[in-house]
Image (cartoon, rainbow, N blue to C red):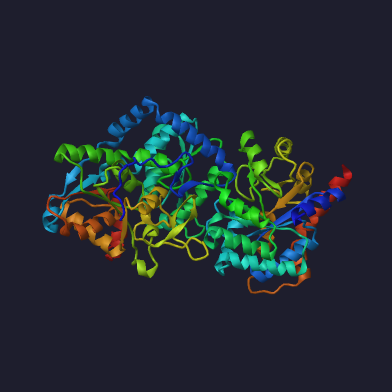
């Protein structure tokens, strides 16, 4: 007989070396180690500085427009006939996604560290835009690395970045997508480490990035907690978020980790279907390994080579995932599943027509899974979907799939 | 005495510095890699750093990235690279071979399987680019038990305290990364390298090799004035890049193709004699 847990220990990851259980850590060339140590030191200092957080909160309120609403999707709830569905409206943030929460925080860090040059990697372009935005605002030089494949499918965001004064650097090595952009950003950082701050866009990469990006994104979950308590006098029953690198999901989940009655569901990109191998779902179908500075679940072949991923959504098209998600999976604290491109596209259209909200294709993955499970849940079940970004950037992709020329 | 120690002992006796070329295994084919290894020795290489490919070489510049892509285009596996070393040892039992690459392929093979196979085929050292001392304890232990040296990098950015602990941890030799950047970069500053080497020598009696950005006889000779070993990668790999996957090459042809190594060897020897 297994005994019930008697001592409930509060969740406290990562450890001082950035480990979430066996995941995370620091796996980079020696050139970058001192820069990461310095970043950790600076962040630990600022973390306890009320002025730093006051400035962060001020920017989030007056520049980003937070708190973002927790919106009751009444018509969707009625049509699905089960759980009560709420949308956390990160799509209403300045620049149109949750990404800006993190870039605001990291830009303040960069400024505190006296760095004058900002670099970033981007997939869908949302993080690149959010980085170019804060760089413009602080008057910092900005270079964004982007795979040439992604440049093709996200031309609107490329133009936005350029308008904001960023230099968009096309990366044509490997699969020419997000992972290659990240390799190139790491190379640039090693070369220009003295004056350069690397703003990583997700909860992956070497320590302290998974921790600090999580801390900046946790504003999402903290707001949901407050909003839910204010609206319903209790916590939600389930949280649903899409997972590529996993920053919007960890931002929503993290404040609820110790509230074990709250179910947390991460939805990966199932692409053409897990069975086809053409997907981007390392937690659903991958194995642990080491990439981009951390140990985590990855999409590899049997020889440890990273394999090409597929997703209709550029923002989820990544072979790894934040190490904290790997740990939450192994702890069985969060569940991870996947939906296909087609299911995500259906959800994209459904939410648009049902609630008048055009979601990002990334966020549409979370909506798609919610649509599957909501009908089977009680009518008093409170479900929160993280609507991590708006879909304007994806109109071109969806029109092309529908054979429409715009 | 293992092969790496023996190699540096011999060089010390001959009052020479080690020349360490790097090539990527499987570029353009495993067969040619074997031929190149012998050619490099004939041209005066003392130790061979043999790269095993990884799909995401985030510490490497474009030349080695492309070499890795060529190698992976016909699915070179870590076990194939080990097999090349076994075949190299059929004819050469003295030249040390150091495997160089990234951690993930070794993780996938499993540390113990990797170590057992590596020692059996005659690998002498391993340098895992994305494995700093903080994360190396498990693999390092397994390698030590197998009698294989673990070589660590020290960079220009490394603080004196870190440098000291890295030097203490290293075995075989210490690899000093001569510049801030990736392999094959063009911003080599010889003076700053030489002055940093003096500091490292206060921490260790191990030989110190210097790599990144050394591209010809002249730069090799200058670095050799302060280092125990000179590592050359991208400049050599860009020559190898001209070879074809399907082609069979004679020993003479490959020796000629890697004449850069002979040029560096001569320049290093002459500088020594002139000094």
The extreme right residue here reads: B273
- Seen at 67% across and 74% down, the residue is B247
Image quadrant in which you'd find residue A97: top left
Q: Position of residue A33 (x, y in %)?
A: 55, 41
Locate residue B246, reporting x and y percent: 64, 74
The part of the image, by quadrant, that contains residue A15 is: top left
Residue B52 seen from this side: no
Residue A394: horizontal and vertical position, in percent? 31, 55
Front-most of residues A309 and A209? A209
Q: Residue B191, how many percent across, how many down?
A: 73, 37
How many numbered discs?
0
Which quadrant is the C terminus of chain B positioned in?
A: top right
Q: Is residue A132 above or below residue A286?
A: above
Q: Is residue B40 left or right of residue B133?
A: right
Identity of the residue furthest to the front in this view:
A1
**Picture quadrant where residue B234 is located:** bottom right
Between residue B64 and residue A153, name the one nearer to us. B64
Residue A71 is at least partly visible in this image:
yes
User: Horizontal placement of A312 versus A291: left or right?
Assistant: left
Say which of B93 and A390 sits in front.
B93
**Quadrant holding the N terminus of chain B:** bottom right
Q: Is residue A189 above or below residue B92?
A: above
């Amino acid at each position: 007989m297994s005994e019930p847990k008697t001592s409930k220990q509060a969740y406290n990851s990562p450890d001082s070396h950035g480990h979430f259980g066996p995941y995370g850590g620091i796996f980079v060339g020696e050139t970058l180690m001192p820069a990461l140590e310095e970043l950790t030191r600076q962040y630990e200092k600022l973390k306890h500085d009320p002025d730093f957080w006051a400035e962060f909160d001020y920017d989030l309120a007056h520049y980003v427009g937070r708190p973002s609403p927790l919106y009751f999707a009444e018509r969707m709830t009625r049509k699905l006939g089960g759980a009560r569905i709420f949308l956390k409206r990160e799509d209403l943030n300045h620049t149109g996604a949750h990404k800006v929460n993190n870039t605001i925080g990291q830009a303040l860090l960069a400024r505190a560290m006296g760095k004058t040059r900002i670099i970033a990697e981007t997939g869908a372009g949302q993080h690149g835009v959010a980085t170019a935005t804060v760089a413009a605002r602080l008057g910092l030089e900005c270079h964004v690395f982007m795979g040439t494949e992604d440049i093709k499918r996200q031309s609107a965001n490329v133009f936005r970045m350029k308008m904001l004064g960023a230099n968009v650097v096309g990366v044509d090595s490997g699969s020419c997508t997000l992972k290659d952009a990240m390799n190139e950003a790491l190379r640039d950082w090693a070369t220009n480490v003295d004056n350069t701050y690397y703003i990583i866009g997700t909860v992956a990469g070497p320590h302290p990035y998974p921790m600090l990006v999580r801390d900046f994104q946790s504003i999402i979950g903290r707001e949901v907690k407050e909003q839910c308590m204010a609206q319903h006098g209790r916590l939600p029953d389930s949280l649903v978020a899409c997972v590529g690198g996993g920053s919007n999901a960890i931002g929503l989940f993290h404040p609820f980790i110790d509230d074990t009655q709250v179910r947390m569901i991460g939805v990966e990109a199932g692409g053409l279907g897990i069975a086809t191998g053409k997907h981007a779902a390392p937690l659903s179908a991958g194995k642990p390994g080491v990439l981009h500075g951390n140990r985590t679940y990855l999409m590899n072949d049997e020889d440890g080579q990273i394999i090409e991923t597929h997703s209709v959504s550029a923002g989820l098209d990544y072979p790894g995932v934040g190490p904290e998600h790997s740990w939450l999976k192994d702890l069985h604290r969060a569940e991870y599943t996947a939906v296909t491109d087609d299911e995500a596209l259906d959800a994209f259209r459904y939410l648009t027509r049902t609630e008048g909200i055009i979601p990002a294709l990334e966020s549409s993955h979370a909506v798609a899974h919610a649509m599957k499970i909501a009908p089977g849940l009680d009518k008093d079940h409170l479900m929160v979907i993280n609507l991590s970004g708006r879909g304007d950037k994806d109109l071109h992709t969806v029109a092309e799939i529908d054979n429409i020329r715009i | 005495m293992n092969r790496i120690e023996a190699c540096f002992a011999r060089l010390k006796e001959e009052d020479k510095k080690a020349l360490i070329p790097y090539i990527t295994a499987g570029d353009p084919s495993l067969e040619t890699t074997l031929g190149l290894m012998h050619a490099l020795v004939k041209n005066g290489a003392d130790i061979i750093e043999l790269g095993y490919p990884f799909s995401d070489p985030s510490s490497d510049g474009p030349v080695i990235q492309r070499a890795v892509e060529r190698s992976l285009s016909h699915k070179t596996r870590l076990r194939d690279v080990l097999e090349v070393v076994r075949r190299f040892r059929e004819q050469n039992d003295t030249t040390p071979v150091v495997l160089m690459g990234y951690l993930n392929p070794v993780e996938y093979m499993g540390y113990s399987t990797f170590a057992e196979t590596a020692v059996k085929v005659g690998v002498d050292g391993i340098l895992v680019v994305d494995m700093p001392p903080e994360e190396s304890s498990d693999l390092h232990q397994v390698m030590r038990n197998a009698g294989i040296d673990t070589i660590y990098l020290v960079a220009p950015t490394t603080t004196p305290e870190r440098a000291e602990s890295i030097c203490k941890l290293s075995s075989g030799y210490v690899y000093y990364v001569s510049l801030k950047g990736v392999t094959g970069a063009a911003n080599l500053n010889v003076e700053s390298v030489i002055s940093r080497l003096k500091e490292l020598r206060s921490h260790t009696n191990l030989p110190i090799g210097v790599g990144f950005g050394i591209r010809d006889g002249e730069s090799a000779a200058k670095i050799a004035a302060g280092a125990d070993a000179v590592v050359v990668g991208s400049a050599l790999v860009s020559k190898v890049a001209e070879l074809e996957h399907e082609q069979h090459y004679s020993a003479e042809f490959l020796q000629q193709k890697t004449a850069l190594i002979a040029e560096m060897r001569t320049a290093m020897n002459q500088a020594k004699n002139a000094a």
